[in-house]
Image (cartoon, rainbow, N blue to C red):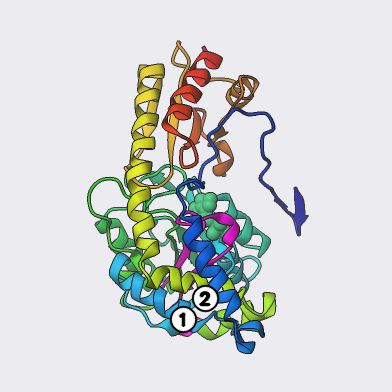
Amino acid sequence: MAVIGAVRVYRETHPRGASYDFRAGRPSFGDFPRAVWCRLLGRRARSASRRDLDYGPPEGRRELREALAERLRRIRGIETTPRQVVIVNGSQQALDLITRVLVDPGDRVLIEEPHYLGARQAFMAGGAELVPAPVDGEGMRVPRPLAGRRVPRLAYVTPSHQFPTGVVLPLARRLELLDWAVRSGAFVVEDDYDSEYRYAGRPLQALAGLDAHGRVIYVGTFSKLMFPALRLGYLVLPEALVDPVVAAKNLADTGSPSLEQLTLADFIRDGHLDRHLHRSIARNASRRAALLEAVRDRFGARAEISDTATGLHVLVWLRDHRGQPIASLARKAEAAGVAVYPVAPFYLHPPRRSGVLLGYGPLSEREIRDGVARLAAALD
Ligand SMILES: Cc1ncc(COP(=O)(O)O)c(C=O)c1O
């Protein structure tokens, strides 16, 4: 843990000795077509021109920005131009750059309650005053502007798979949020981290696709579709923010690595990403089904599952036999070799209930069933 200004920045720790690790937000590393990726990366490395080996443009390589603009139109209903797409080193850098460009110390930032810690910490490191907006069964409740209160500069949302509850923001709330942004002159940061893993029904159009007034900043990442070590993500920006954000990116690191960007552009253009996603959806659907079944079997009425057939984790609220919250839940689980992640740190004001995030991407169905059985035994 480091301290930036007054903000404690948590680093993920990896539990040693856990036989079953339900850490959220990890893709299946085994499902990724490594041989294809290695072939494309090798080809780009061998044929790299001088220009490819030189400093690249801070906004990212044109080949990748074009491939992404085309893909976003097709898959997320976002009409954009390659100019508005800026390549970054994962969503975390996107959140940091947005904060640098838009948030002055003391500015208010509306944030879902509960929310993604990486976003909270980026805004706090920029000196923001966080305004929590409670999440109910339909996602973030859009606030009414309060007379005499300073209007937030930004709102941060995960509308297509709320982190961590999993709720999907319905169309009416999306439109309400956009209307709020227009009326308040605020920007909305749409973090669309894992919603392409959709196991039932059609995905809702991204907020950015509904935005006619240039208020939405869309954040995408390849950490969930491919693998986190790639450290590639992107922003789709309203025209007015392109130049300031590219300048901030230039100052931060002068641009993301070119060879990986070019390889990713090939991977997308040649159809490998769509094929990989298609296969992964089928495999993750089986993992998710195994998890839900195991939780229902082992915990019965003591578990309440918050799940919407999207993403790579579910939130499960657990009670003991008397219907009370379970004390020291993560510690008891860890002692039994199972790593689970309490939901409390994702709240500014944690609830009294015990909830855990169960990520299933990297686990086999058998590991999922065995891990949940052990967890239930440890908590009994
Ligand atoms: C809500 C949310 N946004 C973004 C990310 C991904 O961050 P990055 O692209 O920096 O790997 C995660 C990963 O866990 C996440 O849960």
Amino acid type, callout 2? Leu
Q: Which residue is mark 2?
A: 262
- Front residue of 124/30: it is 30
Identify the residue position indicated by label 1 in the image.
63
Q: Which stretch is magenta?
A: 216-241
Residue 119 is at least partly visible in this image: no
Question: Which of pointers 2 and 1 lies earlier in the amino acid sequence?
Answer: 1
The residue sitting at 25% across, 58% down in the picture is: 171
User: Circle 1 — which element?
Assistant: helix
Give the image location of residue 352, x and y in percent. Answer: 52, 28
Name which residue lies at 47% across and 65% down.
219
Q: Is mark 1 within 8 Å of ligand 1?
A: no
The circle drawn on residue 3 is: none
Which quarter of the figure has residue 70?
A: bottom left
Query: Can the viewer see residue 369 in this picture?
Result: yes
Q: Nearer the viewer, residue 344 or 230?
A: 230
Q: Which picture quadrant has residue 178? A: bottom left
Above or below residue 364? Residue 186 is below
